[in-house]
Image: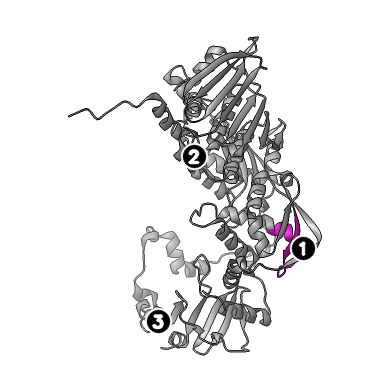
């Protein structure tokens, strides 16, 4: 038999290894920007074309590289930060494993220009497919200028898996933002297809936080600062009103390295318990500074997941630091141990406890429960409690599945000709400003007003492709300013929004002007409606099974629907029922939640039978 095991050629091995580090253009952006700050740069400029597919260029004013270092930097495991295995446990720099430039050179055409302060001329190195094409001396300022072109030009299958330019640019902005937040003292700029996206001067941590989150956060940030011998927790959390439906404004840094940690996210969420709704997420930018020996940052190829030596201590410190910050700013409720003066005047406090009262009290079971041992595990027998046999409580009730029906299909309440079988002109009852109770010939239905209206709007927006909705022009057009990431997202939606009745136009860099809204939407809240739509759309971002238009329709239906808690007139309640009855699938929302349930008369009778 011939041998079957072969050693892969270097260029193929490098391409395979590159797949762990360079997964998309944003991965290369992260590695190159981290190299720039590691080099001591005070200015870092990022330039991308076609969302990094055709060009990613990082220019810095760091210390630069010598001619020999410029060539050696592209070798596998070439690093200036590790000399011994012990160094691996004292890492404070961003890149250290020496794989970034080697990986980039394996999947792109790279040109490097660099110069140190002591060299008169700089060095230019051109590399393609992991091979040095040319090396020459060039005039160059101190620092490094590295340009990678045509990402994955030699791995077409990988290039085909890249998303749209807007999606890839969104990932680039995320990585750019994370590095910029970690090093607020450094100037950062981002240019995309020749247009300036970001231009952030160096400053304090708060100044950088405002640059990233927006000027609206100027008065909405609470400073966090706790220092111990073991670690330091600092940064900012947003006030409760900044909580969102997505995790878009949540950043954790350990020794200035951005990390992802569901465990620490939970610590912050716990600190906000009771201050924000259960389905919302707090905004925060938190920095943890700890001895590098206490963390392992080499547990994941992207170095965004780390392992703490004692994660429970970190969790407790983070939660306590955030709670303390909120309490200091009178946001979190604090305990008041002072006794109300009025309580002191009550009879129970003023009058003495007589011997007879002591004797009477000691005979009661409540007193026994507090004074005798092992009472926590003692369960009294049923004959002592005097309670009836609880099992009999359920014996005479009719089977729930026969009478209490959550409609799984279009069968049931809907008659062929009459629509929803609610008695015509019946007086409807609104319960808790959320549920509509309507009588039918065989019992009654309980309709969830918001979910029912969501179904109505969902089907209406679905049919807008063939029947575009009317638009009402705004008397006073509203200008909407967004961050670059949201601006990209809204740009993708404009065509579908126009079919539904929105008239929105680009209005300069990251700005839009709302010229008109759907004819059936009340004017005056256009700006907030679009901002909320973007938040809800991002909330769907992980649902890859839905198309972009499907996500948009679902978000709009949820946003525009009459909300639970809103008082409705008889006319409005009847209108919802009539519209629901005309839906193709009236019984469930697009996400599968029931819009109504039916209580049959036989079930109601059973509740009151002996």
What is the crowding at mark 2: few (fewer than 14 residues within 10 Å), some, or many (at least 20)?
Answer: some
The residue that label 2 is drawn on is: 159
The residue that label 1 is drawn on is: 524
Nearest to viewer (mark 1 / mark 2): 2
Give yes or no for contact between labels 1 and 2 (Cβ–Cβ under 8 Å): no
Q: Which residue corresponds to the image point at 63% horizontal and 50% vertical from the top-left?
A: 489
Quadrant where the image shows the N terminus? top left
Q: Is residue 543 left or right of residue 215?
A: left
Q: Position of residue 158 (x, y in %)?
A: 46, 39
The residue that label 3 is drawn on is: 402
Query: In front here: 368 or 191?
Result: 191
Nearest to viewer (mark 3 / mark 1): 1
Is residue 481 visible to the viewer in this orientation of the structure? yes
Query: In front here: 445 or 606?
Result: 445
Quadrant where the image shows the C terminus? bottom left
What is the crowding at mark 3: few (fewer than 14 residues within 10 Å), some, or many (at least 20)?
Answer: few
Real-space Cα separation, disc 3 to disc 2, in angstroms = 56 Å
Label whose residue precedes the other's in the sequence (3 or 1): 3
477 above or below 88?
below
47 above or below 547?
above
What is the crowding at mark 1: few (fewer than 14 residues within 10 Å), some, or many (at least 20)?
Answer: few
- Secondary element under disc 3, as helix, strand or loop, is helix
**Span highlighted in magenta in the image:** 513-529
């Amino acid at each position: 038999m011939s041998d079957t095991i072969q050693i892969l050629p270097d260029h193929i091995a490098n391409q395979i290894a590159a797949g762990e580090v360079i997964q998309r253009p944003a991965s290369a952006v992260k590695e190159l920007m981290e190299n720039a700050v590691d080099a001591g740069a005070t200015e870092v400029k990022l330039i991308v074309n076609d969302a990094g597919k055709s060009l990613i260029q990082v220019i810095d004013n760091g210390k630069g590289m010598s001619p020999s270092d410029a060539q050696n930097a592209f070798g596998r495991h070439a690093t200036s930060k590790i000399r011994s295995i012990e160094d691996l446990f004292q890492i404070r720099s961003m890149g250290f494993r020496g794989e970034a430039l080697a990986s980039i050179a394996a999947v792109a055409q790279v040109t490097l220009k660099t110069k140190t302060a002591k060299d008169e001329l700089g060095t230019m190195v051109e590399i393609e497919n992991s091979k040095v094409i040319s090396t020459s001396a060039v005039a160059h300022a101190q620092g490094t200028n590295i340009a990678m072109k045509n990402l994955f030009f030699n791995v077409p299958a990988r290039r085909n898996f890249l998303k749209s330019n807007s999606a890839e640019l969104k990932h680039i902005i995320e990585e750019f933002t994370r590095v910029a937040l970690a090093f607020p003292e450094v100037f950062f700029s981002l240019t995309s297809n020749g247009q300036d996206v970001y231009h952030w001067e160096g400053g304090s941590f708060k100044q950088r936080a405002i640059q990233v989150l927006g000027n609206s956060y100027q008065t909405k940030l609470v400073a966090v600062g706790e220092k111990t011998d073991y670690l330091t927790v600092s940064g900012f959390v947003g006030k409760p009103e900044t909580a969102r439906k997505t995790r878009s404004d949540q950043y954790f840094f350990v020794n200035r390295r951005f990390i992802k940690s569901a465990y620490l996210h939970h610590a912050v969420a716990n600190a906000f318990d009771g201050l924000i709704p259960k389905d919302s997420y707090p905004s925060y930018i938190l920095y943890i500074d700890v001895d590098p020996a206490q963390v392992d940052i080499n547990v994941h190829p992207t170095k965004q997941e780390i392992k703490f030596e004692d994660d429970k201590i970190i969790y407790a410190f983070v939660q306590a630091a955030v709670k303390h910050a909120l309490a200091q700013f009178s946001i979190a409720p604090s305990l008041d141990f002072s006794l109300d003066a009025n309580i002191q005047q009550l009879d129970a406090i003023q009058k003495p406890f007589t011997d007879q009262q002591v004797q009477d009290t000691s005979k009661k079971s409540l007193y026994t429960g507090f004074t005798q041992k092992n009472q926590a595990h003692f369960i009294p027998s049923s004959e002592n409690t005097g309670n009836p046999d609880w099992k009999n409580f359920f014996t005479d009730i009719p089977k729930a599945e026969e009478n209490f029906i959550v409609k799984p299909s279009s069968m049931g309440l809907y008659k062929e000709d009459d629509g929803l079988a609610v008695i015509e002109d019946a007086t409807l009852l609104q319960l808790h400003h959320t549920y509509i109770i309507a009588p039918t010939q065989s019992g009654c239905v309980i309709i969830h007003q918001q979910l029912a209206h969501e179904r109505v709007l969902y089907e209406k927006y679905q049919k807008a492709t063939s029947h575009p909705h009317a638009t009402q022009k705004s008397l006073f057009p509203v200008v909407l300013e967004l961050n670059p990431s949201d601006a990209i997202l809204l740009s993708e939606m404009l065509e579908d929004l126009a079919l539904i009745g929105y008239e929105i136009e680009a209005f300069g860099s990251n700005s839009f002007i709302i010229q008109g809204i759907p004819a059936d939407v009340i004017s005056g809240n256009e700006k907030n409606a679009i901002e909320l739509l973007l938040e809800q759309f991002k909330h769907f971002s992980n649902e890859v099974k839905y198309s972009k238009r499907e996500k948009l329709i679902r978000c709009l239906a949820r946003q525009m629907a009459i909300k639970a808690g809103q008082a409705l007139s008889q006319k409005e309640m009847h209108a919802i029922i009539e519209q629901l009855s005309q839906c193709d699938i009236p019984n469930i929302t697009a996400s599968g939640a029931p819009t109504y349930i039916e209580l049959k008369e036989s079930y109601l009778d059973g509740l009151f039978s002996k």
